[in-house]
Image: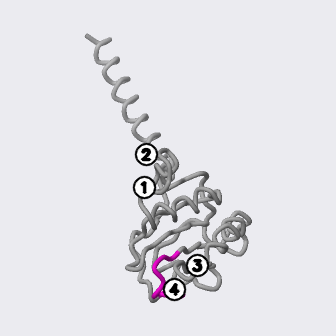
């Protein structure tokens, strides 16, 4: 009987020690599961709100990937398509308003500001141009070329990076 009491006391002490050790360990950092992409833009916030289509690239001056994406988007400017680089240093209020938390973020919106396609991180010219073509004229892109509404090639840089 004495052995049983000793075993019970040792087990109880082990449980208490395990509980104390577990509580002293720091909590795990939260894991980021994604970045925010706006689903709607208020077109008067941007250039040429009367244009039929709008492509915005949310960027940071210190992001080398952003410059490459902007170079691919700027050539889309036309009578029907307005384009704008929204750099966090110059347009922090727009980054905040649309909760942009990673750059580059590219959005393609219609006249009403509804985001029809978006890209987080680097995107190829082919992907951007195909997404705009598909948004402007559904069915114009061959099957398999426009299968993703949101493209996440790599993790985007943090704002101000």
x, y percentage for residue 56? Answer: 55, 75
Please report contact status of discs 1 and 3: CB closer than 8 Å, yes or no. no
Q: Which residue is drawn at 45% across and 73% down?
A: 109
Q: As drawn, is 129 to the left or to the right of 45? A: right
Q: Distance between the residues labelled 2 and 4?
A: 50 Å
x, y percentage for residue 143? Answer: 47, 46
Magenta range: 45-54
Question: Which residue does the numbered mark 1 point to in the structure image?
Answer: 139
Q: Nearer the viewer, mark 4 or mark 3?
A: 3
Q: Which of 153 and 17 is in front in this view?
A: 153
Q: Could you tell me which quadrant the N terminus lies in?
A: top left
Q: Which of marks 1 and 2 is in front?
A: 1
Question: Which residue does the numbered mark 2 point to in the structure image?
Answer: 23
Tag 2, which secondary structure? Answer: helix
Q: Nearer the viewer, mark 4 or mark 1?
A: 1
Question: Which residue does the numbered mark 3 point to in the structure image?
Answer: 83
Magenta highlight on residue 50: yes
Where 124 sits versus 106, above or below? above
* Residue 46: mark in rendering: 4
Q: Which of marks 1 and 3 is in front?
A: 1
Q: Which of 29 and 53 is in front in this view?
A: 53
Of mark 1 and mark 2, the one earlier in the sequence is 2
Tag 1, which secondary structure? Answer: loop
- The quadrant where residue 58 appears: bottom right
């Amino acid at each position: 009987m004495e052995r049983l009491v000793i075993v019970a006391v040792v087990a109880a002490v082990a449980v208490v020690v395990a509980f104390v050790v577990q509580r002293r360990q720091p909590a795990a950092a939260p894991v980021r599961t994604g970045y925010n992409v706006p689903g709607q833009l208020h077109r008067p916030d941007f250039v040429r709100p009367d244009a039929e289509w709008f492509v915005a690239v949310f960027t940071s001056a210190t992001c080398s990937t952003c410059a490459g994406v902007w170079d691919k988007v700027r050539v889309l400017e036309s009578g029907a398509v307005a384009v704008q680089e929204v750099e966090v240093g110059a347009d922090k209020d727009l980054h905040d308003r649309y909760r942009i938390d990673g750059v580059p973020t590219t959005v393609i919106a219609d006249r009403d500001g509804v985001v029809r396609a978006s890209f987080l991180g680097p995107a190829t010219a082919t992907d951007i141009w195909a997404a705009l073509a598909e948004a402007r004229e559904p069915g114009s892109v061959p099957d398999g070329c426009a299968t993703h509404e949101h493209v996440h090639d790599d993790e985007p840089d943090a704002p101000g990076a």
